[in-house]
Image (spheres, grey):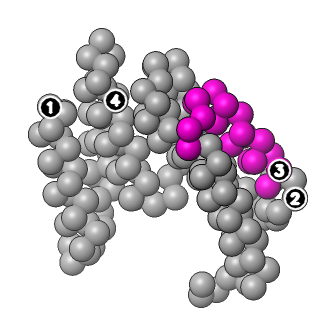
């Protein structure tokens, strides 16, 4: 990794290893158990491994993104799913791919839950598209995600 110290690389690999181990260990757990274990891992890594403000924020983002994805996978009701979404909004996005992932899962969750007004999901899709359009026109990532976003809009009616 260019421009990153060996110590930072080591911390990143250690955090990734702990994160991966927890993913495997919790694959059959309920969302409530899973959420508690991820929050415990977050506290542990923040205390023992993570050193910089950037690393702290990125770790929090990764945990928030994982919990959001798990809340979707467990088809959690709005009070839980919405809480995970709000946390991601507060922390921000690491990159446009993560923004796309969150927007698409939210749109699909709204499709599963027609009692929930999809206005916010539509706004999130629009915002994601705006960010994708700011990538260089020659970017394969830009083209691929714009096409996938268009397809997801058709599938969900948003």
Q: CA distance from mark 4 to mark 2?
A: 36 Å
N-term mark: 1 or 2: 2
N-term mark: 4 or 3: 3
Residue matched to label 3: 44
N-term mark: 1 or 4: 4
Residue matched to label 1: 157
Could you tell me which residue is drawn at 39 percent across and 59 percent down?
Answer: 97
Residue matched to label 2: 48
Taking the image as drawn, is residue 101 in sight?
Answer: yes
- Please say if the residues under marks 1 and 4 sit with CB atoms less than 8 Å apart: no
Vertical relation: 151 (above or below) 11: above
| Residue 66, magenta (yes or no) | no
Q: Which residues are magenta?
A: 27-45
Tell me, for residue 109, which label it has, or none: 4
Taking the image as drawn, is residue 123 in sight?
Answer: no
Residue 75: x and y, percent?
Answer: 42, 27
- Please say if the residues under marks 3 and 2 sit with CB atoms less than 8 Å apart: yes
**Secondary structure of residue under mark 4:** helix
Could you tell me which residue is drawn at 80 percent across and 46 percent down?
Answer: 43
Q: Residue furthest left?
A: 154
């Amino acid at each position: 990794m260019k421009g990153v110290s060996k110590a930072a690389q080591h911390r990143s690999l250690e955090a990734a290893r702990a994160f991966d181990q927890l993913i495997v260990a919790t694959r059959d757990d309920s969302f409530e158990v899973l959420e508690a274990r991820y929050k415990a891992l977050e506290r542990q890594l923040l205390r023992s491994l993570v050193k910089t403000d950037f690393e702290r924020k990125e770790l929090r983002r990764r945990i928030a993104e994982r919990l959001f994805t798990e809340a979707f996978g467990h088809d959690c009701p709005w009070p839980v799913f919405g809480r995970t979404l709000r946390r991601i909004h507060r922390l921000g996005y690491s990159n446009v791919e993560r923004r796309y992932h969150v927007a698409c899962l939210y749109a699909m969750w709204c499709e599963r839950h027609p009692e929930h007004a999809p206005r916010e999901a539509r706004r999130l899709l629009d915002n994601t598209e705006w960010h994708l359009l700011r990538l260089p026109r020659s970017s394969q990532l830009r083209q691929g995600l714009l096409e996938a976003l268009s397809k997801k809009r058709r599938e969900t009616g948003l």
